[in-house]
Image: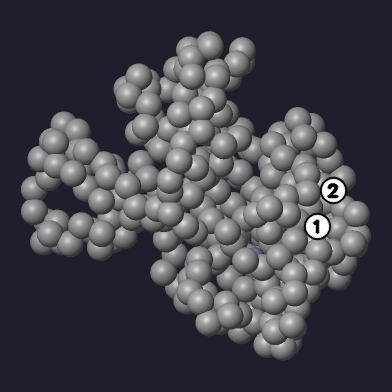
Amino acid sequence: MTAPLLLGPLRSTGRLLLTAALCISLLTGVADAATAYRVKPGDTLSGIAARAGVSMASIQAINPSLRRTDRVQLGRVLKLPNRKLAARTHIVREGQNLTVIARKYGLSVTQLVRANPKYAGGRALWAGTKLTIPARRAAARTSTPGATVRRASVRVSRATGGTWLWPVKGHHNVSSGYGERTLEGEQEIHYGIDIVAPVGTLVSAARSGRVLESRPDFDRGWGWTVVIEHPDGWITRYAHLSANLVRTGELVVRGQPVGRVGNTGRSTGPHLHYGTYLRWNPRDPMSLY
Ligand SMILES: [Zn+2]
């Protein structure tokens, strides 16, 4: 489990070798096909959404029968959108304003207005109006690879009322922050932070929850990865591990070791990629500490 997958183009780039500890977030792209999914016993819409890696709203948006409910009927076949974050359209309903719509899609009002400039001046929004929902770009901060080194301290999060544990004890150097960054000359969005630590360092669950995924995920560049679903809709991702210490479905408690730091997947040096999502809407982990 310690053999890292080394990608030729990344490895051969001197700049990347020097900056080290970068990984590519593959969450950008353009939406296309949907996948059919038959509802199984015990399924909930939030659970299906979490497993598919998409928001409940996006499933509701392409399944007319779910538009006004979060109940899923056993045996019904649902369309699941690809977990890509391209622009979509939202049809405004009675009583909805920009704030409500932005929140629904995990966007800020500014981001929503930027995609719909004619509402910048506070123009009234009528039911039936079509709004463009931009690809999620939760942070507009540009970070240069290797240049961001921040220290994090553990404190009680105002956002959730719970305490988030820093996942790699004693290692607080963040080599690449959350948000837009330039990698190999290309703009991309990094939905998480990269915490530098030696291979083998224990990675702990930031909060208690259930293991949603524990597997090698080389297709999406995450390498060996653990994803934990927390009871209030938060999800944490731990990627590029050298070892996974938990199994899918297992319940874990806050602070429990779930893996070891590695360099697997699209990674250019030993680090933990740590991602936090609220109902799969990416959030900056640093805002939780
Ligand atoms: Zn990363």
Quarter of image, ligand 1: bottom right
The residue identified by callout 1 is: 241
Does residue 261 appear in the picture of this structure? no
Provide residue 176's location: percent of width, then percent of height: 62, 73
Q: Is mark 2 within 8 Å of ligand 1?
A: no
Q: Is residue 164 left or right of residue 113?
A: right
At 47% across and 24% down in the image, what residue appears?
78
Q: Is residue 107 left or right of residue 4?
A: left
Q: For the N terminus, give its image quadrant.
A: bottom right
Q: Is residue 251 above or below residue 201?
A: above
How far apart marks 1 and 2 lie (CA) works out to 7 Å
Disc sitting over residue 244 in the figure = 2
Badge 2: residue crowd in 10 Å (few <14, some 14–19, many ≥20): many
| Nearer to the camera, 183 or 103 | 183
Q: Amino acid at mark 1?
A: Leu
| Nearer to the camera, 254 or 277 | 277
Q: Amino acid at mark 2?
A: Asn
